[in-house]
Each structure stands twice: as C-alpha cells, then as structure tokens.
Image: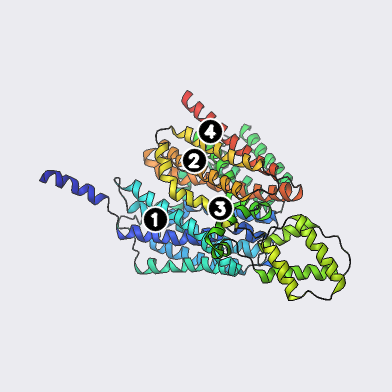
Amino acid sequence: MTTSLQAQQPATKHWRFGARFYIANLMEVFERLAWYGFFAVSSVYMTTPQSHGGVGFSDSQRGAIQGIIPFFLYLLPVLTGALGDRVGYRKMFIVSFMLMAPGYYLLGEARSFWPFFAALSLVALGAACFKPVVVGTISHSTNDHNRGVGFGVFYTMVNIGGFIGPMVAGAMRAISWDAVFLMSAAWIVLNFIPVLLFYRDPPALRQQHASLSLILKQAQQVLGNARFALLIALSVIVLMSAGVQWLSYGSAFLLIALWVGANLLWDRLPVATMSAKTWWRQPIRISNPRFALYLLILTGFWTVYNQLFYTLPLYIRDYVDTGDVLALLAVFGDSAVNFFAHVDQDALAQAVNALFLQLQQGPSNIDLEALRLQWVHYKVNVPNAELAVLVERLSLLAQQQAQLSTVQLTVMVDALSAYRQVNPEYLINLDFAAIVLLQIAVSALCQRFKTFYVLSAGLVVMAMAFCYLITMDMHASGWAVVCVILLIALAEMLTSPKSQEYVASIAPKQQAALYMGYYFVSMALGFLFAGFLSGWSYSQLTLALGRPELMWGLFAGIAALTAVALICFHSSAKQQ
C-alpha cells in the first residue's frame, strides 16, 4: 500500500498548476475582454456615420483595416516570441500593455481612416507582443502529464473573455461609442496589477536565444528560401495597396501576375542556379511543399470563418428582423429587452423631427430604403411600408403646423421603437457561448474519427451555414440567423482544433514549436482575404446590387472548395 501511495504522489503533483499559470490565465481573460469587446462591434462601428457616433468608413475602407491589421497581428508573434525569450516574458507583457492601453483609447478618438489605422496598428503590435509570451507561460507552467488540461483551461479562458467582452461592449455602446473604447483600455490597464505585483519569469526561461537572422533562416527551412519569401511578400503588399485603394484590384492582380511571371522566367535563365552563393541568383525553392500547400488550403477556412465577425454583424444590423428573438427576451421583462435592444429614444426623436423639417421645405421624394438603412443606426429596423405611412403623415403635418408637438413626437417614437432590434454583437456572442459549453464534448466525440474527415466535415458545415443564408430574402428572421451562428460555431469546433492537431502530427519533433508558429500564417492570410472580400462583397453585391445571396454564395463556395481541396490533399498523401 505504501509503495502504491508513493507512486501516486508524483502523478498528483504533476496535475497541480503554479501561481504563474493562473496569473497568465487572468491576464488572458482581461486581454480577450478588451479585444473582443472591440472586435465584435468593429464592423458596425466603422460603418456607422459620424453623426451617429461612428467613423463613417466605407465598406472598402473597413475591409482594408480588418484585413491588413490582423494579418500582421498573426505574423508578428514569430518575431515577438523570439524577442520575449531574449528579454524576458515580464518585460514583454509590460510593453504589450503599454502599447494596447493607449491604442484602444485612441481608437475612440480617431475620426478619419489613417489615424484609426495607426491606433489599431498600435493595438495589434501590443497583442502580437502579448500572444506568444502568454502561451509561453502556459507551456512553462505545465508538463507532459498536465499540458493537455492546462491548455484546455487556457482555451476556455479565451472563450470566456470572448463571451463576456461583447456583452460588456454592447452595454457600453448603449451609453456611447466612446465608452466601448474606454472599457477596452480599462481592461488592459487592469492587467498592470498582476504583471507588476505578482508575475515573475519562468525559471527555465532561456535568456540566450537565436538571433533574428537565425529565426528567419529557420522560417526558410520550413516554408522556402529568400526568393520564395520575396515573391509572397511583394504580392501581399500589392494586394494591400489595392485594399487601401492606392490601386484598383484589377491593376493589383495584373501586377501580381506580372511579378510571378517575371520570377518564373528568371528561374529559367542560366544565371539562376541552386549552387549560387547570392540569394537572388537561386531559383525559387519551397522547402516543404506539402506543409505550404496545407497552410494555403487552410487559409480558405479562416477566410470564411471570419465573416462571422466581419460581414454577419452588418447583415444583422441592416437586413435581419430580430423581433422574433426579442419576443422571447420579453418573457424576462422590460429590463432584458432594454439591455439587448436598447434604443436611444431622444436620438430617434431628433431623427423624426429632422425628417419633418425636411418635408416642411416642400415636396421631396424620400428614398424609403435609404431612410431605413439610415435609421438602423438607431437600432430600429422599420419596414418600408411603415416608413411610407410615417412619411405621409409627417408630410400632412408639415403643411398644417410649424413644428411637431411633444405628444406627436412621443407617439411616433413609441411606434418606431416597436421595431427595435437585438444588437448584432449579442447574437454573434452565441458562437463563444456554444464553444464554452460544447467544445470538450465535440472534441471527445471527434477523437474516434480521422483528422481530415473531421476537418472536411467542419468546412461542409460552414458551407451549409452560408447556403442557409442564401435561401433567405433581404429581411431574414432572427432565429434563422441564430441557427447560422450556431452552425458556424460547430464548424469552428470541428475544424480549428483538428487543423492544429494535424500540424503537430506532421512536425518533426525538434521543430514542433517552429511548425506551430507558422500555422498562424494561414490565419494571417485568412484575415487578410476575409477583410478584403467582406468589404468588396458587402458594398458591391449586397448594398449596390441588393443581392446578398451572391455574397453568401461566394463564401459558401470558398468553404466547399476548401473542403474538396483538403480531401484531395489527404488522398494524395495516402498515395505517396
């Protein structure tokens, strides 16, 4: 019996986590509260007119910001992680908070494109400093026996922050948009308490680490040589130039095609040889073609998944009637209705009065659809037929009296408030709730299936979600969108963990961390393409053409094509 108990003691000890582990998880929760508090409402805020408290960006500008900034956010940790190993995790945490806190505050102060771009870049740089060191802390705080549990706890903290952040942000924007950014900054400021008072670097942290040049060489060993890196980097820069409207997309794709053609032509010249000592004379070489192809295919998943945050909130705001969801919330009383679907009645009254004054100037043709899309920023989605009745009534009153009475305004605002809508961020939040509740069960169920079958199934579910959106008209119901969000959450639960599991399974033992680091390349490219496609498709297909089904069909097609590509990739691997 004594021997048995002694044997159990080390195992019990292995399941214990030190204080550093819990401090890191606490900081992760605060950082996610700040990020998702902003991220969940970012599309809505950026496209909200300045008269309504937003910045009034076009969808193209919004897409450029949402594509470019996260692209660098997910690439930079490769370098910032190495820097953290050299200077220490605690210093990197402090630097990250010093960047993010003012960055979030300045986001609320920016009123034009480039200041907003610069402020969000500051936030992204801080987040890129934070990500690798918090994951590194978890890694140092766990061992072979409890690493799975440790990272499971960490992933749960990520989603708890993702769930609570948008809830708080929704409550804050009922006060003002500025309050959203002040709250995000406040979450980051709170992180100074644990890092300054309690956090200490892991004892096993190596202070001497590889130089930057060696890190870049390691990157080339995984993906390709310097020529390959230059080919990709300049192509991405040209694409970004189109995203910020320095070039048209047609010109950008032409330049990229010419650049790729020039490189292929150069490789056929006698001057290009693998034995050359200078990098520019060496032909383009992909070090691990299968891994690079896998990352490229996986980019398709991240491209469509991010539409949950980039495009769907705008679609919910502009075209979805959430009255059916609100009817359920009404069961819990007026406080629940006011929380999830707050309407600033004073602002709405001012809008009605402004319309009255416009009609008082003389007969004018009111574009009812344009008026509806303008008033959705007041969180009411009034049918065009009801708007026509309101305009007709205001026109008659404009001929009879100089101004609207308080009673008349109150009656009209009350009638309009009946069409109040649930905030998009609250509905999107169901994704995080589903993951917190179901991820462990879904992962356990999927253990019995091969990785690529689960990966492909997740993408099929994603395609089904967008296909369901295709079947809706311009004014979808709230419960239909709830089903779509839950389907996307299921797709994420199936695909995201398994996509990382595959990388871990193919990585050489001595390069496991390096391969996992470059897994984020697919996420970076996915954010880039997601932003550009969201901005273009929503402005051109949904708003300009009035054909949102074309937009959803595009995303469904990308998801289906990615699933087919993964199946073909897996089949070719089995044949080799």
| Residue toward you, 417 or 191 | 417
Residue 535 vertical position relative to residue 395 in the rendered view, above or below: above
Amino acid type, label 2: Thr
Residue at the disc numbered 4? 566
* Dots 3, 4 in contact, CB < 8 A: no
Percent x, y for residue 254? 72, 42
Amino acid type, label 3: Ile
Q: Residue at x 56, y 51 (%)?
A: 71
Q: Residue at x 73, y 75 (%)?
A: 406
| Label ID, residue 85 | 1
Is residue 290 visible to the viewer in this orientation of the structure?
yes
Amino acid type, label 4: Leu
- Mark 3 lies on a secondary structure that is helix
Which badge, 2 or 1, comes first in the chain's sequence? 1
Residue at the disc numbered 2? 495
Percent x, y for residue 403? 80, 75
Q: Nearer the viewer, mark 2 or mark 4?
A: 2
- Mark 2 lies on a secondary structure that is helix
How many other residues sit within 10 Å of disc 1, few (<14), some (14-19) or many (≥20)? some
* Dots 3, 2 in contact, CB < 8 A: no
Percent x, y for residue 469? 64, 43
Q: Nearer the viewer, mark 1 or mark 3?
A: 3
- Mark 4 lies on a secondary structure that is helix
Furthest toward the top, the residue is: 575
Q: Is residue 419 left or right of residue 365?
A: left
Q: CA distance from mark 2 to mark 4?
A: 11 Å
> In the picture, residue 318 is in which quadrant?
bottom right
Residue 557 vertical position relative to residue 111 in the rendered view, above or below: above
Which badge, 3 or 2, comes first in the chain's sequence? 3
